Image (cartoon, helix red, strand yellow):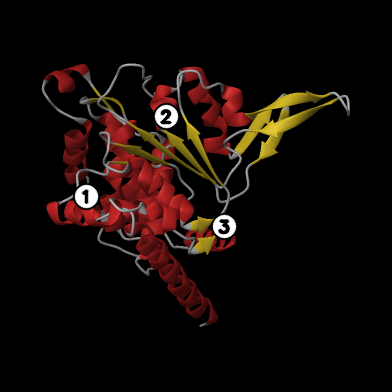
Amino acid sequence: MPGPVSQGADLDTLSRVVERVRGNITRVIEGKPDVISAAITVLLAEGHLLIEDVPGVGKTMLAKSLARSIDSSVRRIQFTPDLLPSDVTGVSVYNQESREFEFRPGGVFANIVVGDEINRASPKTQSALLECMEERQVTVDNTTYTLEPPFMVIATQNPIEMEGTYALPEAQRDRFMVRLSVGYPVEAAEIAMLDSHTMSSPLDDLEPVTDAVEIRKLIEIVTQVHVSQAVQRYTVALAAATRRTSELALGASPRASLHLVRAAKASAAIQGRDYVLPDDVLGLAPGVLTHRLIPSVEAAMGGRTTASILESLMSSVPVPEGTRA
């Protein structure tokens, strides 16, 4: 009895904190509950978020409102063509008084790192994020520095404008747990935005509703969520289907399977469950898998997108009927 009761109490605590964070972000981002829930899910799953959409729909506002809702260290990096890798990771500077080199931490030394317009930086600078995103550490001059949890990179990019941009390589896209699009707001939400954003920015008045210590506790709760063998096999079957089809030149990696299960555990916990359902995996699969896939030349010439190919594959993989068993 003590185990389930404690788990239930933990899930209640998680639900209350998530609602506070969601309510805080809603003050800034109007009419996008699914997008907000996805961002919180990635945070609790210890993943990284890539927000890709056209200009002016609130990509950076979403990232900054999530960051400001948590009382933790936050750094914003504006990615530009002249940004150097040392600006991201840090650099050793010679101190003439002590006659020693001192390490000056870069922008990634924070709990939440907001990378704005990440595809405007050169590939060399983009690669500076590879180690910290996967291993949560930074190595400079043969010295490794650990990044304190929680650690989350929220990057934005504009898929429309190609001038002066550098497409993210597959290795870096694969490190983002979820890619999402904010999309245009519905008419009522846009009218409400005009009413609330013209006099002052709601982002300026946003106060933290939780802190890094509490987020670490919630992440620990999420790790205890049960994933049955049937759900694990279903997740692997989805990933394997993307590798076998001739419509995709690049399928989902094992890291994608791992990210999908982690996100499903966070989603289940947010919904008050201590176990993952196949529906959790199915609902998160498009956001977790689509940006990792590359269509074949034949599929692209036939007008097939990665989203449509994945949808077909998801419908072809049998969904297990078991839940916790």
Label 2 Cα crowd, 10 Å radius (few <14 / some 14-19 / many 20+): many
Residue 296's spot in the image, x, y percent? 23, 21
Label 3 Cα crowd, 10 Å radius (few <14 / some 14-19 / many 20+): some
Residue 282's spot in the image, x, y percent? 26, 51
Tell me which amino acid carries mark 3.
Answer: Ala
Q: How many marks?
A: 3
Tell me which amino acid carries mark 2.
Answer: Ile
Q: Extreme bottom residue here?
A: 1
Q: Is residue 173 left or right of residue 199?
A: right
Circle on res. 212: 3
- Judged from the image, the secondary structure of the residue bearing numbered disc 1 is loop
Q: Extreme right residue here?
A: 98
Seen at 58% across and 44% down, the residue is 110
Answer yes or no: do the residues labelled 1 and 3 have beta carbons within 8 Å? no
Seen at 49% across and 60% down, the residue is 208
The label nearer to you, 1 versus 3, is 3
Residue 117's spot in the image, x, y percent? 39, 30
Q: Is residue 310 left or right of residue 49?
A: left
Residue that mark 2 sits on: 118
Residue that mark 1 sits on: 318
